[in-house]
Amino acid sequence: MSQRKLFLGARLKRLRRERELNQAGMARELGVSASYLNHLERNQRPVTVGILLRLAEAFDVDVKTFASDSGDVAGADQLGEIFSDPMLAGLGVPRYELVELADNAPSLAQGIVRLYTALRELQRQPGSTEPGADPRVLITPETWVRDYIQAQRNHYPELEDAAETLGGALSDPLSMSEPMRRRLKEAWGIAARVVPQSELGNLSQHFDPDRRQFLISSQLRAENRTFALGYQLALVEFSDVLDRMVVEAAPPDEGIAQLLHMHLANYAAGAIMMPYGRFLKACEEMRYSIDRLCGEFGANVEQVAHRFTTLNRPGARGVPFFMLRVDPAGNISKRYAGEQFPFSRFGGTCPRWNLHATFQAAGQVVTQLIETPDGERYFTVARTIERPINTETSGGLLAIGLGCESRHAHRLSCADVYDLEKAPVTPVGPACAICPRIDCGDRATAPAGRMLTVDRREKTISPYPFQAA
C-alpha cells in the first residue's frame, strides 16, 4: 500500500451506500468535510493511511482487504488472468493499468470478466446458442451465482441474524434434528419423514405442499438429514427474506434465480445448525478443530469448512479462510473465500498444492505451508470427504481444501506441529498460463505473453523456460 497511491473511490461509495449514509453522514463519521469525501469518491484525492484507520474504527473495515483488489469480483488478479489469454497477451497491458481499472471502474472490470467468461463457455460448448439468442445464456448459472456470492464475501447479515435467533431457540445438546422436526410440525404443519430411496427416485429430499410432508432419503447420512431439515425450515421461516434477497440480486433468468435461492437457503440451513455467535466462540475455544466442531454441532466436515468461510460479521470475524471442493478428476464444485483466494478463477489449482494428494491418503489430514508469487504465505489443510449420499449412480470421495494467511495459523490447532518460521514452504502459483515462476518442473503449459528461452542444445527442469518480466 505504501508503494502506490490508493484511489478507492468506488469502494468508498459502495461502503457508504451499504451503510445507508449520505456523503455528509459518512464525512462526519470519518471526521472530514463532505467536499473532501466527495473528492475521495471521485478519485480526485488518494485515500490516506489516516482515512483507512478511521474507516477501520468507524465501520469495522478490514484495512488490508479494503485497500487490496482481492475482495472485488473483478480484481487486478482476475483481469491479469484474462489479459494473459493468447488472444489478448499481445497487448502487453501492464499490471498498473489493470489495478487502475479494477479500482476506478469496477463495473467496467466486471463487464470484461463476464464477457470473457461467456467466451470461455462458448469455446467449451461451441454451437450452444443460435444467432440472435440472448448472450446472457453464455454465463453459466453456477458462474453467475459464484460471482454474486463472492461479491458479498459469502456473508449475509440479514440471514445470519434471523438464523441465529431461530437456531439459538432450537439448540439441543443431543441433536438439532429433533427440535427442527418439531418446529416444522408445530409451527408449519409439515411432517418430516425418512423414506427409502426408491420412493424418491433421483431425489435426496422432497417437499409435498399438498400433503404437507417433507420426505428425506434414508441414504442421506445423519448430518445431511439434519441439514435437510434446516434447509426446509429456512424455506418456510425465511421465505420473505429469501425472496427479497433474490429480487435485489437481479439474476438474469429464472433458472439462475432458483439456483441463487437454493444457495441462500443452504446458507441459512448452515447458520441455523451453527448459530453465528455460538459457533464463532466454539471455533476460537477449540482453535478451529474441524473434528471437535463436527461433534459439537452435529455437522460434517464439509458443513463446518463451508461455515468457516462465512465468519465475516463486522466486529466478530473469524479466521478468513478460503475453501475448495474438488473431485478426483480435478473438477472444482465449490470455491469460497472469506478474504482472498490465491488461485486461478478460470483455471485449476497449482499441482504443487497437495489438495489432490489427499485422494491417496483418504481420511487423513494433510497440511502444507505454501507461498504465492507475491510472497504471501498460506497455511492449508486438506482432507477427503464422502459424498452426502451414496447410490448406484453417485458415490466416491471428494476433497476439501482450506487455507488462510499464515499470520492466522497460530489460531489453528492443526498448525501446532509447525514451526512457521522454520517449516518448509512450497512455492505455488495460479494457473500455469499466468504463473510467473520460471524454474518450475511441474509447469503444464507455457506462460502466456512470455518469450520462451528454449535452447535445443540443452534441456531445463521446466519444460517451458521463459524470460523474466
Image (spheres, rainbow, N blue to C red):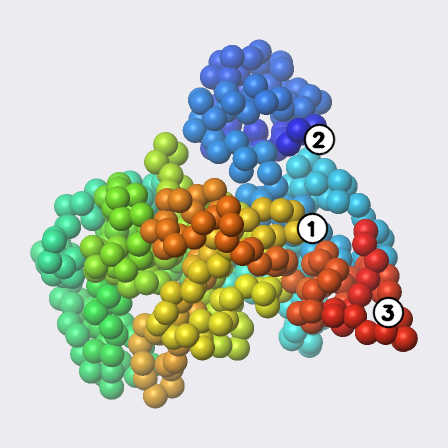
Q: Write down the residue under mark 3.
A: 454
Q: Amino acid at mark 1?
A: Leu
From the image, state whether disc 2 or disc 1 is nearer to you.
2
Q: Nearer the viewer, residue 117 or 210?
A: 117
Of all residues shown, which one is farthest toward the bottom? 392
Q: Write down the residue under mark 1.
A: 79
Q: Amino acid at mark 3?
A: Val
Q: Write down the residue under mark 2.
A: 4
Instruction: Check disc 2 and report its element: helix, strand or loop.
Output: loop
The residue at the point 69 percent across, 76 percent down is 126
Judged left or right of residue 193, residue 467 is right
Q: Nearer the viewer, residue 42 or 314?
A: 314
Q: Amino acid at mark 2?
A: Arg
- Residue 150 position in % (x across, y down): 50, 50
The residue at the point 74 percent across, 70 percent down is 461
- Residue 436 position in % (x across, y down): 72, 56
